[in-house]
Image: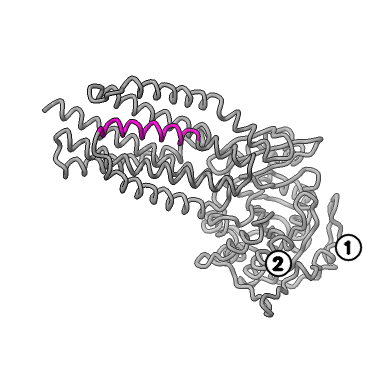
Amino acid sequence: MSKKMNKSSQLYWASGIVSICGIIFEVLFGALGSYILGDGVKQYTLTISLFLTGMGIGASLSERVVKRLITRFIAIELLIGLIGGLSSFTVFGITAVAGEEATAIVLYSIILVIGGLTGLELPILIRKANEIGVEMNKSTARVLFSDYAGGLVGGLLFAFYLRPEFGLVKSAFLVALVNISVAFWMIYAFRKEIVHRVSYLVVAILIFLLMIAGTIFGEEIAFSFEQRLYKDPIIHSEETSYQKIILTKEQGDVRLFLNGQLQFSSSDEHRYHEPLIHIPMAAATKTEDILILGGGDGLAVRELQKYEEVKSITVVDLDPRMVELASENHLLTELNGHAFEDERVRVIHKDAFQYIEEDNNRYDVIISDLPDPNNESLNKLYTWEFYSMLRNHLRSDGALMVQATSPVFAREAYWTISRTIEETGLITSNYHVDIPSFGNWGFVMGTRKPIQQNKLDVAVETDYLSSDMIPSLTSFGKDEDEHIIKDGEEVTFEPNTLIRPHLIEKYEAAWLYY
């Protein structure tokens, strides 16, 4: 009886451990898809759907597994360890060599296979527990409890420890080592039942050594794959709790990428930041209290430092590491003029939506320097609800300036953002500038009073923007203005809201081939 209890308890523990590995692989695949393919909500939805579908297929196929249950379970763990461990490494390699379409096919195939193998695990463990002598209802309940409890642990481990500490590549290898360790454990615990246990042991040792090598060297090799995704040499790469930060440099041109998206090029970033800052500063009657949403690179702050009358600059950026890097990296501090050392600057690390909900202050100028709305979490920062809160935090004679993607590459997205701001009751002014590294880029300014563009005066030193050129920035060509004809009718732009976040669809469709 005690031997039966001992073996059954080992099966329950094994169930909990492999379920931890399973859920980690599932969320890791979602994160991997979000980073490489974009649109986090879409990628996590596909990951969950494919993983569960795979589990269903695996559970169905498990009906045929009625003999040599423990050896089948060991084989499954070795396969999960091998395929799951190499998953991130392989996906980065495919992306570098074959592009996103091939990456999507490979990634989704891996998800389906790992899901299928995971679906095989539980029925086999339940049957094995029943075979040992545990009643079917008890064995099912206990294995399922171990599985679900392990799922919670796995999700928390990935979100709060594995991803921020080890990244996507090393995490996959580390989790695979756990799967293979479970295989070793089962080989030893049920050694008398395994006919070819030496063969299983040799295979397990070989895969284990491969995963150890991957843990040590895999990230470095994957880094060389990732380098092929960028035109210039990578000089800094790190994965924070919120995003992947990449810095590249070639012949003096420093570029910042967040989650693979270009944020600025040092050769022309002044063409972006000068209109972003100096037009609303010229439009506002007072310019003492400034709020910047985003702007963790410090470049917007640098432009604001040119104004002596500015008393406070509040920067709300979610990722502490971005601000730390912009405060410590000598290439970034040279660009931003040591912006975060200014006593007038106060940095708050919080989601911009949450900050605006809780903040009681009002500002003369509000700058929304946020990433493009390419996922649900960013979309909420481009909604009528968010802009309405910004309007309420804006003093009556103040100005709100929003970076609003490209009116050339994402024409409908740009004018949807403009319409959304207009629906809050603010009067909108539309601008666009040519930035060589970005292309034609757009901004939307919101004020409570009409603005005479020819009266705006840029009163500080700039490298690009001048007072007399501002009116020209409001002129849009026929292929970039708001008059879009589809099926013989002009497109009507609806505001983007939390309930109907249609801006994401327009943005994705526009940038699909760029």
Q: Is 216 placed left or right of 487 in the picture?
A: left
For disc 1, the marked residue is 468
Q: Is residue 398 visible?
A: no
**Per the image, is 83 magenta?**
yes
Q: Using the rendered view, name the quadrant where residue 196 is placed.
A: top left
User: What's the amino acid at mark 1?
Assistant: Asp
Secondary structure mostly seen in magenta is helix
Q: Using the rendered view, name the quadrant where residue 247 is placed.
A: top right
The crowd level at tag 2 (other Cα within 10 Å; few <14, some 14-19, many 20+) is some
**Per the image, is 212 magenta?**
no
Q: Nearer the viewer, mark 1 or mark 2?
A: 1
Residue 367 locus on image (x, y percent): 68, 56
Q: Is residue 160 visible?
A: yes
Q: Using the rendered view, name the quadrant where residue 477 is placed.
A: bottom right
User: What's the amino acid at mark 2?
Assistant: Asp
Image height of 119 relative to 185, above or below: below
Residue 36 locus on image (x, y percent): 58, 45
Image height of 309 relative to 450, above or below: above
Q: Is 1 placed left or right of 57 in the picture?
A: left
Image height of 297 relative to 293, above or below: above
Describe the element under mark 1 as helix, strand or loop.
helix
Residue placed at 69% from the left, 71% from the top? 427
Span of residues in magenta: 68-86
For disc 2, the marked residue is 397
Alpha-carbon span between mark 1 and mark 2: 22 Å
Q: Nearer the viewer, residue 254 or 137?
A: 137
Q: Earlier in the sequence, mark 1 or mark 2?
A: 2
